[in-house]
Image: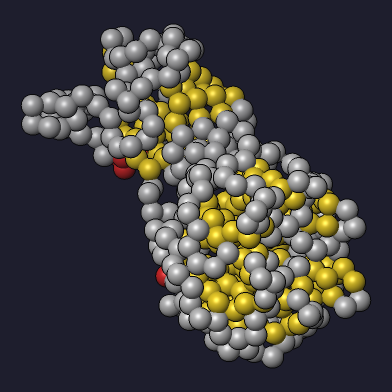
């Protein structure tokens, strides 16, 4: 197969497909003017085990949950078909936007086109039913619907981990309850390091990644949905420190920017299974020591940091789409700073907040900048709590956030309400440290 079927055939997953009769109803094998509901199709289908391979051959009458977490999947349709033969394919892991499915019509037509065309579907959460009509039209999608509103998992708990303590680099972690209470130290797991980043993935888990253990590294450590940190996973992508990370797409993550001796803008996507991908070419101004958070329920934002040329300190931001695509620079709003932190807050993590850091005069600050549910950064809000930098932040309690720790080192925290109001200092718990990471889980 070659070429891509275009919007004429609507294979991208934007709604039911079919030729319309004079009454506007879909013409299907059920007869003119009568549409087939997905439930009617699926009711007569024999569902098979989850398919994870890169290739498979479909048999008429079957339904296939297709898990593309690790790879794309090329599906070969039957070489011959009878009128009314039906197949159903479903995005098992909501990952087709990352790894698509490709349909090989195996000599038969697909929606009126011969198999010199490539048919591919790349929408998360899609359920696709196709029925063989005749030799002219061949296979026609009778249902092509995606679940647009995947339930957003607003994580209940948080975790601070790693960093630099008075005694040196550490891997210790501290859990945050769904009421924002920080627990005592949990013995460190994995390589002790600092200047790393962390984010959520999989809807209820987290990942710490990259950093500096005396030299820059790309090692990662997964966090279970019970807050247990796992041993090191071999690093993927460019080793660096001073980077940022956030969730996107409702269940995936992204590490971005940083420094490996030079400022970087490259990114590495994290799948919904916690697998880190190789480098994606950078977009936007290369910088380090910025921060990132989610907004709008399924998108992210990188912001602020330290560039390689004057004026060095910046308030630039870069939005991350719900498919992990980083946008070009958005003009700075608020005081340029670096070494701050950011987290989401609000219903279903629909807003974000950047806070604290150090400004271009070298002064620590506690001011904040709110991020709307459309990714618009607000002007400076007067700081509350002790001004500091090299801290971390995460969401907790489904709609609230917490800033914690920082240079000193200190272990104090500041809670963020579900309307983005930062509270005064809470006495620190656990090992005082800076240059740590934080994410939510559970």
Give the answer, above or below, for where 228 lies relative to 114.
Answer: below
Give the answer, above or below, for where 357 lies relative to 411.
Answer: above
Name the residue located 38 percent from the left edge and 20 percent from the top edge. 5
Q: Looking at the picture, how far across and down is residue 311, in whole percent?
A: 63, 56
Name the residue located 76 percent from the left edge and 46 percent from the top edge. 262
Give the answer, above or below, for where 440 lies relative to 408.
Answer: above
Q: Is residue 349 left or right of residue 210?
A: left
Q: Is residue 110 visible?
A: yes
Name the residue located 74 percent from the left edge and 41 percent from the top edge. 237
Residue nearer the viewer, 279 or 258: 258
| Number of numbered tags placed on the structure image | 0
Q: Looking at the picture, how far across and down is residue 432, in whole percent?
A: 79, 81
Q: Is residue 200 left or right of residue 10?
A: right
Residue nearer the viewer, 243 or 29: 243
Quadrant of res 433: bottom right
Q: Is residue 442 left or right of residue 14?
A: right
Query: Which image quarter is the C terminus in?
Result: bottom right
Task: Identify the image's colour scheme: rainbow, by chain, secondary structure or one colour.
Answer: secondary structure
Return the residue found at the far left: 22
Residue nearer the viewer, 145 or 43: 145
Q: Looking at the picture, how far across and down is residue 122, in whole percent?
A: 46, 34
Q: Looking at the picture, how far across and down is residue 228, in whole percent?
A: 74, 67
Quadrant of res 245: bottom right
Name the residue located 61 percent from the left edge and 66 percent from the top edge. 337
Q: Is residue 92 visible?
A: no
Give the answer, above or below, for where 114 lies relative to 223.
Answer: above
Quadrant of res 45: top left
């Amino acid at each position: 197969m070659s070429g891509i079927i275009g919007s004429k055939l609507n294979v991208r997953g934007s709604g039911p497909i079919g030729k319309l009769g004079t009454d506007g109803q879909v013409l299907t094998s059920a007869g003119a003017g009568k549409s087939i509901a997905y439930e009617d199709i699926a009711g007569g289908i024999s569902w098979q085990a989850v398919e994870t391979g890169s290739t498979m051959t479909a048999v008429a009458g079957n339904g296939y949950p297709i898990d593309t977490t690790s790879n794309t999947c090329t599906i070969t349709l039957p070489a011959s078909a009878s009128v009314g033969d039906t197949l159903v394919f479903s995005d098992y892991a909501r990952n087709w936007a990352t790894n698509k499915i490709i349909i090989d019509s195996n000599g038969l037509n697909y929606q009126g086109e011969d198999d010199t065309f490539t048919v591919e579907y790349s929408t998360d959460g899609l359920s696709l039913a196709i029925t063989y009509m005749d030799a002219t039209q061949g296979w026609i999608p009778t249902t092509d619907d995606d679940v647009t509103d995947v339930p957003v998992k607003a994580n209940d708990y948080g975790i601070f981990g790693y960093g630099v303590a008075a005694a040196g680099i550490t891997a210790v972690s501290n859990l945050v309850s769904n009421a924002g209470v920080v627990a005592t130290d949990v013995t460190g797991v994995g390589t002790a390091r600092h200047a790393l980043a962390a984010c959520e993935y999989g809807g209820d888990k987290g990942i710490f990644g990259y950093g500096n253990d005396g030299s820059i590294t790309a090692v990662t450590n997964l966090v279970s949905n019970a807050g247990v940190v796992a041993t090191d996973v071999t690093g993927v992508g460019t080793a660096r420190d001073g980077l940022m990370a956030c969730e996107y797409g409702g269940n995936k993550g992204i590490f971005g920017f940083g420094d490996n001796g030079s400022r970087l803008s490259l990114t590495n996507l994290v799948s919904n299974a916690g697998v880190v991908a190789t480098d994606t070419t950078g977009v936007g101004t290369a910088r380090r020591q910025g921060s990132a958070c989610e907004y709008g329920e399924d998108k992210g934002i990188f912001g602020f940091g330290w560039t390689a040329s004057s004026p060095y300190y910046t308030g630039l931001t870069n939005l991350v789409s719900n498919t992990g695509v980083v946008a070009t620079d958005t003009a700075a709003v608020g005081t340029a700073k670096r070494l701050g932190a950011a987290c989401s807050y609000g219903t279903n993590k629909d807003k974000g907040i950047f806070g604290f850091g150090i400004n271009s005069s070298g002064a620590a600050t506690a001011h904040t900048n709110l991020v709307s549910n459309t990714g618009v950064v607000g002007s400076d809000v007067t700081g509350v709590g002790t001004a500091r930098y090299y801290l971390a932040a995460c969401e907790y309690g489904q709609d609230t956030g917490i800033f914690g720790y920082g240079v000193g080192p200190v272990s104090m925290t500041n809670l963020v309400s579900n309307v983005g109001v930062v509270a005064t200092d809470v006495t620190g718990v656990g090992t005082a440290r800076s240059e740590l990471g934080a994410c939510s889980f559970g």
